[in-house]
Amino acid sequence: MKSRSLKSIKTLFFVVVALVLTACANTGSGTKVEQQQKILQMKETVLTQLFASKPDTRQQLAAAPGYAVFSNANINLLFIAAGAGYGVVKDQATHRYTYMNMAEGGVGLGLGVKDYRIVMVFHTQAAMTHFIENGWTFGGNADASLKAGNKGAAVAGEAYFGDVTVYTFTESGLALQATIKGTKFWPEASLN
């Protein structure tokens, strides 16, 4: 009997986690234009937050051939990490947007759920094109976050990968993790 109730608790936990990730990681229902507008609104909100915390990034983005902004929900449960999200790449030369999805999975020690944002600054056109066409990254991740709304603290990251600068910051969540994970980014056919 005890084993059965533990199994039910685990199943319920995974269902709740899946619902939370799904709610945080998609644009919801609506027309193509409504979904695009939601993503562009998220982009503006994230850039406003980035510029407020790192004012020098405004000039960096203005001078770059392009940039990407993503919203991601992530969960870590002991040895497994998973996440999903959406975002947009802006080509500064053509002013064209490429709407994208993202998913991640990994292994390592962790526990918690977090909602975080990613801003990528592409310093060359080739780096941006490669990202849109291939969009795969693999690397380690270690952070601690305890944040709800405007309260709490989160470790913000800044990393350089060749011709790309990546900024990450936690929007909300409670997580302690050290994982090795892969992230896949790909264009969302229904929105492009």
Image (cartoon, rainbow, N blue to C red):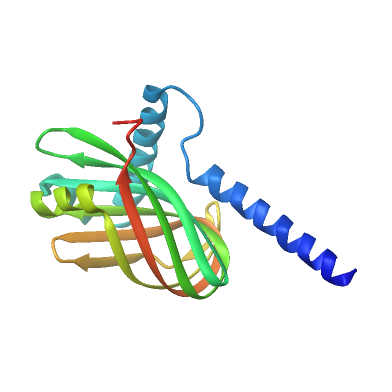
x, y (%) of residue 44? 33, 39
Q: Nearer the viewer, residue 154 or 186?
A: 186
Nearer to us in this view, 172 or 189: 189
Instruction: Determine the residue positioned at 16% across, 52% down.
Output: 130
Q: Position of residue 57 (x, y in %)?
A: 22, 54
Q: Which residue occupies 41% across, 29% down?
A: 35
- Relative placement, left or right, of 170 versus 185 is right
Q: Nearer the viewer, residue 55 or 68?
A: 68
Out of 132 and 150, give the one closest to the viewer: 132
Residue placed at 11% from the left, 33% from the top? 94
Residue 105 occupies quadrant: bottom left
Q: Is residue 59 visible?
A: no
Q: Vertical placement of 27 versus 138: above or below?
A: above
Q: Residue at x 49, y 61 (%)?
A: 82
Residue 54, visible in the rendered structure = yes
Determine whether, in the image, residue 70 is placed left or right of residue 91. right
Left or right of residue 93: residue 183: right
The number of callouts visible is: 0
